[in-house]
Image (tube, coloured by chain):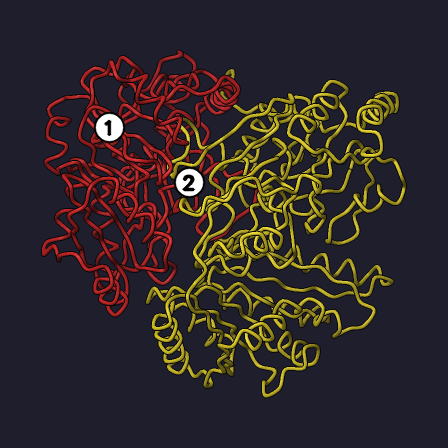
Chain colours: A yellow, B red
Amino acid sequence: MDGTTHPAGTAAAFERPAPDAVGEVVAGLRRRFGERASINAGVREQHGHGEGLADAALPDVVVYPHTDEEVAAVVRLCNAARVPVIAFGIGTSLEGHVAALYGGVCLDLSQMNRVLEVNADDLDCRVQAGVTREQLNAELKGTGLFFPIDPGANATIGGMTATRASGTNAVRYGTMRENVLGLTVVTAAGRIVRTGGRARKSSAGYDLTRLFVGQEGTLGIVTEIQLRLYGVPEAISAAVGQFDDLRSAVQTVIVAMQHGIPVARIELLDALQMKACIAYSKLDGFDAKPTLFFEFHGTQAGVKEQSSLMEAIAADHGGHPFRFATAAEDRSRLWKARHNAWYAALALRPGAMGFSTDACVPISRLADCVLETHEDVERTGLVCPIVGHVGDGNFHLLVLFDPADADERARAEALAQRVSLRAIRMGGTCTGEHGVGVHKLDALVAEHGDEAVDLMRTIKQALDPNGILNPGKTVPARRRE
Amino acid sequence: MHEAVIQGWQARVREAAAAKTPLAIRGGGTKAFYGEAEQGEPFDTRAYAGIVDYEPTELVVTARAGTLLADVERTLREAGQMLAFEPPHFAPGGTLGGTIATGLSGPRRPYAGAVRDHVLGVKVVDGRGELLTFGGRVMKNVAGFDVARLMTGALGTLGIVAEASLKCVPQPRAQATRVFELSADEGIRRANEWGGKPLPLSATCQCDGRLYVRLSGAAPAVEAAAAKFGGAEVPDGEALWTAVRDHAHPFFAAARDGAPLWRLSVRSTAPHTDLGAEQLIEWGGALRWLVAPRAEASKLRAWAAAHGGHATLFAARDRSPGVFHPLPPALAGLHARLKAEFDPHGILNPGRMAAGGA
C-alpha cells in the first residue's frame, strides 16, 4: 500500500516564526518601502481583522506595494525567511480571513487601485487587485457597461476574487467564479504568473484561474484581474411581494426559476427581518411578513413581461399584490432597505453583537432548512432574523448575542454550527459565499470528508511548500485525530 | 452493485499505481481524437452508469460518469430542461464523464457559460485510488479549493471522474435562426455589437460569407429581436446548430477525413485575418476553426497569442506539432506540481495533456 494514501498527518501546522526572522523581514521591508511599510500599532490593529466577529490577530508590519514586482519582492523575502504573508484588500471579509494568526506581513493592496484597461467591445476589463467594486462601476460610467457582482460591502476586486464572492445578483450574472477571465498571481516562490486571458476559452492546460478564485490568499497573491463586464440594461424595475408564510414565498421562487425568468435579484426576508427593516428604514405600507424583493433587468418590454409573470406566479401561491418601483429613487430606497438589513437587525437588540451564517442548500430544501432553523432559534431563545439569496438556496441567519454574556455567545456559536451541519445534511454547504477563513475549517471537513480535505492540503503544500501564504486558513493544517 | 464498480476502480488504480502501469481512461471514445494520444491499458468507465438524482425543481442533475450524454440530455428534455453549454457529441456513444474530462462546450457557450460553469460538484478517483468528493449540488459553494472546476477539462490526468452534479436550465420557450450575407470582418463586428446588448442571442456562426445567428428565449423577446435584426429566416435552424456543434457541417468535411483541424481561441473582437484557409467562426468571434497543415503551427500559435488566446490542434491524423499551445515555464511548473499531487505515480492518462508536463 506504499504511496496509496495521502500524507495526511505529515503536514505540520504552521509555527510562529522566530522573532529574529520577523525582525529581519521588517527591517528589510522598511529599507525598501520606507513609509509604505508601517509598524504603527493602530495601522496593524486595523489590519488584523475583517468584519466578522472579533478574531483580531495583528501582523508585525503592514506593507503597501504599488506593483506586481513589489508584491513579488515581499513574498520572496517572506518565503526565504518563512514569515507569513497575508493579502489584505479593504477588510470586509467575514470569516477571519485576514487575521494574522502567526503574525507576519500584511500585504495591503489598496494602493494598487488602477483600472488598467476597459475593452468595451470585448466586454471585459483588467484591474489591479485594490480596485473596489464601486470604484470600478464609477469608472465604467459612460461606457454603457457595468460589473454586476454585488456582495453588499464595497469590497476590492482582489478580495472578491480571493473569496469567490457573489451576492444579490448571482442568479442572473453568476459569481466571481464565472466572471473572472484571467489573473495575475504572485506565487509563494515570488514568481509572477498569468492565468487565463482575454479569450473566452481561457488558457491551454488546467484551469488554474478557477483554482486561484476562492483560494483566500493561501495559494498565491492575486494582483490583477481580468473581468467580464455586462451591458447596462435598458430598463430596470424593482418589486416587493409579501406572503403569509415562508414556504409560499420560496415556492414562488422555485416556480419562477422553472420558467426561466431571468430575474436579476431575488431576496428573501423572513418576518422578523422585515419587521426590523420596516422600523429601521421607515418603510410604509408593509407588514412584518415573509417578503421577496425582486429586481428585473432587460428591455422595457422584457422587464414588464418578467415582472407581471412573476406577480402572477406569486398570486398563484397566495402572495399579496406586488409593490413596484421603476423610478431610480424609489428602487434605490427599497434596495437600500435590503442592504441595510444588517443594521436593521442589530437595532432589534441595541447593544448586541452579531454574526452571519452562510448555509446554501438545494432550493427544494430551502424552506425546510429555514423553518427547521426557525425552530432551532426558538429553542435557544436568541433573536436571529434571516435574509436569503433565495434564487440559489443561500441564506444568512443573523445571530445576535450579548457580548458580555459568555454563555449566550456560546449558545450563538453552537447554533451557527448546527446551521452549517443542517445544510450539509440537506445536501448543501456550510458556506455559499463568505468562505472558510478560520471559522469554517471544521465544517469543511464535515462537508467534504477527510480524504478530499487531505487532497486540498496537498494542493496547498504543492503550491506553497513553506506554508507562508495566509497560514491557518481555508484548509486545516492537519487531520483531526 | 454500483459500489462494487467503484471499489473495482479503486483496486485497479491502486494496482496500477503499485506497478506504475499507465491507464488510458475512456468512456465512449467519441472524443479520443482530442488531446495527445492515449497511452496505457484501456480503463473503460461505462460500467458505472445511471442518473443518481434528478429533481427538476432544483435544476440539478447528478449522474455517474459512464451515463450516455444522450441519456442525460433526453432525461432533461422530458422535463423541459437542458445542459446550457450545449456539449458536442461528434458521434453517438459519448459519456457524461468524457464531456467533463474534455471540457468542450458548443455554440451556446459565450452566452450561457462553459462546462466548468455548470459543474457543481464531482466525485473522482485520484491516482492513489482514493474516492474523493469536491463541491456538491448547490448553486453556490465556497467551501475550500475549487477542485471540481480544476477537474473539468483536465482530460482525466488529475483523476477519473466517477460522478458529477451539473446545473441545468429550462429550455428556451422560443428559438429562431436568422442569416445575413456578410463578409467575415463585418460578421465579427456585428456579432460583437449584438453580444453586448440585452438581446436573446444564443449562438453565432460565420461561414462562406454568411453570418448565422440564433435567438433563444421568451417568444416576444425572440420575435422582437428577429424583427430588429432583419436578415432572412433559416427554417431548420436547429439542424444547422447541431451540425456546427458536432462538426457534421460541410466546413468540417476535410477534417473528418483526417486533415489537421485547428481551433483558435481568441478575444472575440480579433480582426479577421487571412491565415491561409477558410475559417468557420463561432462564439461571437471568440472561436475560429480552420483546416491548415501542421507546418503552420507556429504561425497560427503566434497569431492566436497576439490576440489574447491560443491555438489547439483539435483533430489530426498526425498530432506531431503538439496538440496544445505550449505554456510559459512558470505555469508549466504549477501544472506539474498539481499533477504530482493528484497522480503521484503518473498513471492517469499520462501525456494526454502534454502542455505542462501532465
Residue in the foreground of this view, choosing between B122 and A351: A351
- Identify the chain of the residue marked 1, using the numbered disc in the image: B
> Residue at 72% across / 33% down in the picture?
A65
Helix, strand or loop for disc 2: strand
Q: Quadrant of residue A206?
A: top left
**Pointers 1 and 2 in contact (CB under 8 A)?**
no
Residue A128 percent coordinates (x, y): 61, 39
Residue in the foreground of this view, choosing between B214 and A94: B214
User: As shown in the figure, which amino acid type bears the numbered disc 1?
Assistant: Asp
Helix, strand or loop for disc 1: loop
Q: Which of marks 1 and 2 is in front?
A: 1
Badge 1, how many Cα within 10 Å: few under 14, some, many 20+? Answer: few
Q: Which residue position holds label 1?
A: B274
Q: Which residue position holds label 2?
A: B122
In the rendered image, the vertical position of residue A245 relative to residue A447, given as above or below: below
Badge 2, how many Cα within 10 Å: few under 14, some, many 20+? Answer: many
